[in-house]
Amino acid sequence: MNNKKEKLIILENDVGSGVKSFSFLAVLSALLVWFTSMMPVLFTKLEASQFQQSYQNTFGFDLMHVPMSVIDLPYWLLQLNTVELLGSGSVARFIPVLLSMGGIFSFFILLKLWFGTKDALIGTTLLATNIGFLLAATSIQASLGYLVIVLCLGLIGVTQLSRGRSQAIVLVVLSMLLALYAGVYGWIFICILALALLRVTKLTKIQLNTGHRVSVIVMFLLALPFMIFLVRSYPQLWPWSEITTDSLLSNVEQIGRFVAIGANNPLTMPTQWGLLSFAEITLLLLGVLLLRRKFKANRYKIMSALLIGSVVVGVIHGVSIEFIGAFLPIAIIFIIGGVRYIRDSWHLILPRNKTGKTTAIAMVWIVIAVLLLLNVSRSFLFWGRISETQSQYSQDITLEF
């Protein structure tokens, strides 16, 4: 009987190893196909003016007056490449939705690993409603900014398996470049490839560090075309010459108004609400206290560095997709920390009984529900203000009074 069980276990392990090996080869093949398909777009459309003209001819949307940046340009490249490969503009217009879904899913996985399922659902819902509101406010550009930092955080969660700090940092930096370049498709391939490599190293009893080195080499090769593209397009993408002391001070004031007040900003004008409400700012500050006490030291340092880095990006670029994409996911993670702080410390302000605990939980859920309704209502308010929406409905519907 024991021999049969041992044979079954060996057979299951062999089948599992075969499936993993097949998945690894399939992912590697898909990566090669995707990488080959992206090469012509990167190396034949390096001039911004040529790219803008090509995009206008394909979609009928003029990019000449749209400010191009490091965040925006890979998105346009990916969208244009989709049209060239599939010959469908509708599929390309669906890319922002796919990018947002991929970013939201990665964000949920990260929060689930750090906080648990319930808190992950709350944080993911907040991010999803904020993305919906900002997509409605800025049409199609907002999702990629979220994707970059969210997937970067996801990789930080994955690289917690690594003992080498320098290797983890290299993985984070390269994956950030790759996320900018590839979008969610390349990110899925890279995640599966990296995990498959780690799994293969365990099955073959190779040292874990070797698997990480192989992953770094693979991601570096895939990120190389995008880095070449950045170097050759440096003057057009990085407006460092326009940065002055006055502009930095102006950006600081603009960020403060945008995040907390919302006055005199096109993204928040209809409602005069800031990016974060007073309740969210309070939860964020409480989350800083909780994460400082209960998070691992390295993880807290990473989160704090990313939060400070997002503010630095805002000081340089002002209120932009880059700043929003870097700041909002980090802020939501701290907000979830604030939710946990209230839930764990309810006995400090309420009686130590079931009624007090139920009241504390109800208060938290009421606050979360109000925040979600706030974001959903802003999405509907903005939807009618988008130029694409107005042009579409003005052509299809004629109102007579």
Image (tube, rainbow, N blue to C red):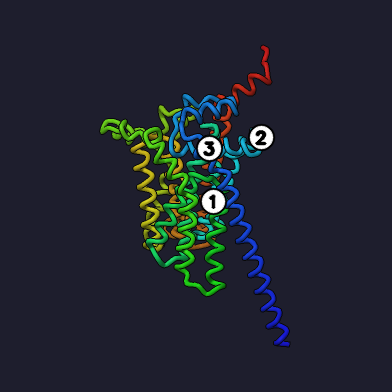
Give the image location of residue 168, x and y in percent: 42, 60
Q: Residues within 10 Å of mark 1 (few under 14, many from 20)?
A: many
In the displayed structure image, the side of residue 229 where residue 60 appears, left or right: right
Disc 2 on helix, strand or loop? loop
Q: Which residue is rendered at x = 53% and y = 45% of the image?
A: 183
Residue 23 visible? The answer is yes
At label 1, which amino acid type do we have? Trp
Where is the N terminus found, in terms of image quarters?
Answer: bottom right
Q: Which of these two is toward me, 249 or 177?
A: 177
- Residue located beneath label 1 in the image: 187
The tag on residue 385 is none
Can you tell which quarter of the image residue 397 is in?
Answer: top right
Q: Which of these two is toward me, 235 or 109?
A: 235
User: Is residue 184 positioned above or below 379 on the image?
Assistant: below
Q: Which residue is rendered at x = 29% and y = 34% of the image?
A: 249
Task: State the CA–CA distance, disc 3 to disc 2.
Answer: 15 Å
- Residue located beneath label 2 in the image: 88
The mark nearer the N terminus, 3 or 2, is: 3
- Residue located beneath label 3 in the image: 77
